[in-house]
Image (tube, grey):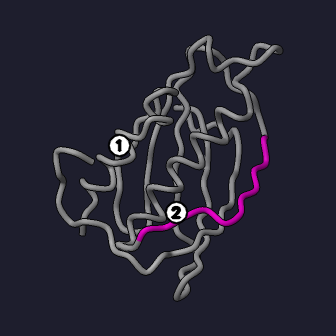
Amino acid sequence: MHEEYIKNIFNNCNVGKLLGIEVYEVKEGIARGKLKLKKEHINIFGNAHGGILFTLADHVGGACGNSLGKKAVLVESSIQYIKGADEGDTVFAEARLTHRGKKIGRIDIRIFRENKDLLALMHVVFFMRDDDHKTKITENI
């Protein structure tokens, strides 16, 4: 397995770094990440912007899909927002593989606060390409 490699490439992704997303756990079919909400993440109503929560879920879901050994890309996604989050909150994402076919898979992602208060649910469909991921970390990713 290449969990450290996947964690490393997602933690060095430009978008994830820009927002402050940390992928802290990757296992085959599971990924977990977090984001501390800053004022730059807050919308005009004083809550986390939906696009920020979407990006957190997408990013952690991507790590989950890519944990299977093949390069995986998003095909379709859907998110349901349940509650808002505030500046200073740390929000968590947990992605779990719920279906794996030969080329297509599905991942369910939960976004929640540290106290497990559910904020959003996301479902993604992804496509597994034929090419494998590298199995070791290189200096120039």
In the picture shown, does residue 105 fall above or below 39? below
Q: Position of residue 33 (x, y in %)?
A: 45, 42
Q: Quadrant of residue 23?
A: top left
Residue 14, compared with residue 79, is above or below; it is above
| Secondary element at image label 2 | strand
Mark linked to residue 135:
none
Query: As drawn, is 136 to the left or to the right of 28?
Result: left
- Name the image quarter holding residue 137: bottom left
At 52% across and 32% down in the image, what residue appears? 114
Q: Please, is residue 123 above or below residue 32 in the view?
A: below
Question: Picture coordinates of residue 66 (x, y %)?
Answer: 42, 64
Between 120 and 50, the one nearer to me in the picture: 50
* Sequence-first tag of 1 and 2: 1
Determine the secondary structure under disc 1. strand
126, above or below 16, in the image: below
Residue found 50% across the figure and 30% down from its top: 35
Can you identify the residue that label 1 sits on? Answer: 24
**What is the magenta segment's predominant secondary structure?**
strand
The residue depicted at 55 percent of the width and 86 percent of the height is: 101
Distance from Cα at disc 1 to Cα at disc 2: 14 Å
Residue identified by numbered label 2 = 96
Q: How many numbered marks, from 0 up?
A: 2
* Quarter of the image with the N terminus in it: bottom left
Range of residues picked out in magenta: 71-81
Residue 49 spot, x, y in % from top left: 72, 26
Q: Amino acid at mark 2?
A: Arg
Going by the numbered disc 1, the residue's amino acid type is Tyr
